[in-house]
Image (cartoon, rainbow, N blue to C red):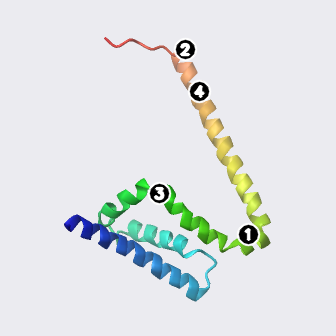
C-alpha cells in the first residue's frame, strides 16, 4: 500500500509539471507542444538538483518499460500541428536530411576507424581460444 502511494505521488508530480507547462504554452502562445516544454522543465529541475531522481524512480521505472506506448500521445499532439508542417515543412526537410547524413557518415567513419585499429592490433585475424 505504501509503495502504491509513493508511485501515485511521483506520477502526480510528473502530471503537475506537464499540466503547468501545457497551460504556460497555451497562455503565452509558445510554438511548442506542452509535453516538450514539460520535458525541458523536468530536465532543468533534475539537472539543477531541485528534484532528485530518487523522488521519481519508483514511478518512472514502470513507465520506461512501456516507453513506446507513450509516444502515441506525442504523435497525436503533433497531428494538431499539421498546418504548421504543411506551411513550413520544407524548412524541416533540409535539417532532417543533413542530420541523418551526418549521423550515418559519423557512425560509418567510426566503425571503419575501429575496424582498422582492430585489424592492426590483432593481425587481421580474429581468434577464439577455447575455455579450459
Above or below, 61 relative to 55: above
Q: CA distance from mark 4 to mark 2?
A: 11 Å
Which residue is depicted at the point 54% across and 24% down?
Answer: 118
Q: Tell me whether circle 3 and circle 4 mark residues in contact (CB < 8 Å).
A: no
Q: Going by the image, does 105 lie left or right of 64?
A: right
Q: CA distance from mark 1 to mark 4?
A: 41 Å
Judging by the rendered image, the residue that carries numbered circle 3 is 67
Judging by the rendered image, the residue that carries numbered circle 1 is 85
Please give the label number shown on residue 125.
2
Query: Which quadrant is the C terminus positioned in?
Result: top left
For label 2, the SS is: loop
For label 3, the SS is: helix
The image shows residue 25 at horizontal and vertical percentages of 56, 82
Q: Tag 3 or tag 1, which sits nearer the N-term?
A: 3
Q: Tag 1 or tag 2, which sits nearer the N-term?
A: 1
Above or below, 96 relative to 105: below
Which residue is depicted at the point 76% across and 58% down?
Answer: 94
Residues packed near mark 2 inside 10 Å, few (<14), some (14 to 19) or many (20 plus): few
Amino acid at each position: 500500500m505504501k509503495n502504491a502511494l509513493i508511485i501515485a505521488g511521483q506520477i502526480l508530480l510528473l502530471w503537475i509539471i506537464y499540466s503547468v507547462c501545457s497551460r504556460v504554452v497555451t497562455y503565452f502562445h509558445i510554438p511548442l507542444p506542452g509535453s516538450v516544454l514539460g520535458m525541458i522543465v523536468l530536465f532543468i529541475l533534475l539537472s539543477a538538483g531541485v528534484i532528485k531522481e530518487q523522488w521519481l524512480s519508483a514511478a518512472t521505472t514502470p513507465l520506461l518499460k512501456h516507453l513506446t506506448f507513450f509516444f502515441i500521445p506525442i504523435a497525436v499532439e503533433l497531428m494538431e500541428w499539421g498546418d504548421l508542417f504543411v506551411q513550413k515543412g520544407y524548412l524541416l526537410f533540409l535539417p532532417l536530411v543533413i542530420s541523418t547524413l551526418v549521423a550515418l557518415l559519423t557512425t560509418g567513419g567510426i566503425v571503419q576507424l575501429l575496424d582498422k585499429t582492430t585489424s592492426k592490433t590483432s593481425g587481421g585475424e580474429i581468434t577464439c581460444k577455447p575455455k579450459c
